[in-house]
Amino acid sequence: MFSRSYNEYNDSLVYINHPRFYIENVYVIPEVIPDFRGRASEAYMKDTLEYNGIKILHNNKLKFRKKDLTRDISVSPGQFYQQNFRKKRIKV
């Protein structure tokens, strides 16, 4: 729950529900891309595979099986986004 901020016309708190967000796409890029900034839409990839709803983007022949590339991914398309797990999912 969040409250709206105070303004000159509203002197009390009004609680509103936090909007829910869903994860739409999950991408795996199993190769090094020079100058990649983290957005799949900015990278040109020659081929795309889909395995269990997860999209694998690649230019070269895959060195690993699709099952191995997607085994330890804890998010899936259609799942609710949970901000408290954000640090676990993003690896720098």
Image (cartoon, helix red, strand yellow):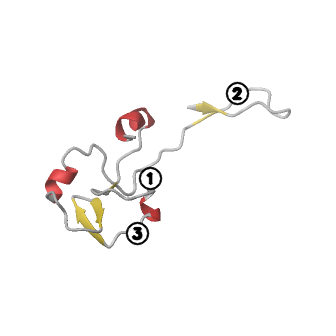
Residue 45 percent coordinates (x, y): 35, 69
Callout 2 amino acid:
Leu
Q: Which quadrant would residue 80 be assigned to in this image?
A: top left
Q: CA distance from mark 2 to mark 3?
A: 48 Å
Callout 3 amino acid:
Tyr
Q: Provide the residue designation for mark 3.
A: 44
Q: Is residue 44 depicted above or below 38 in this figure?
A: below
From the viewer's perspective, is the residue at label 2 or at label 3 nearer? 3
Q: Provide the residue designation for mark 2.
A: 13
Residue 42 percent coordinates (x, y): 47, 63
Q: Which residue is farthest bottom?
A: 46
Q: Which residue is farthest top?
A: 12
Mark 1 crowd level (few <14, some 14–19, many ≥20, 10 Å Cα): few
Drawn side of residue 74 relative to residue 88, left or right: left
Callout 1 amino acid:
Gly
Which is more toward the observer, 61 or 14?
61
Question: Which residue is painted at 35% across and 53% down in the image?
Answer: 78
Which is more toward the observer, 41 or 75?
41
Q: Secondary structure at mark 1?
A: loop
Which is more toward the observer, 3 or 48?
48
Drawn side of residue 88 relative to residue 7, left or right: left
Mark 3 crowd level (few <14, some 14–19, many ≥20, 10 Å Cα): few
Question: Which residue is painted at 37% across and 59% down in the image?
Answer: 33
Q: Which mark is residue 38?
A: 1
Q: Secondary structure at mark 3?
A: loop
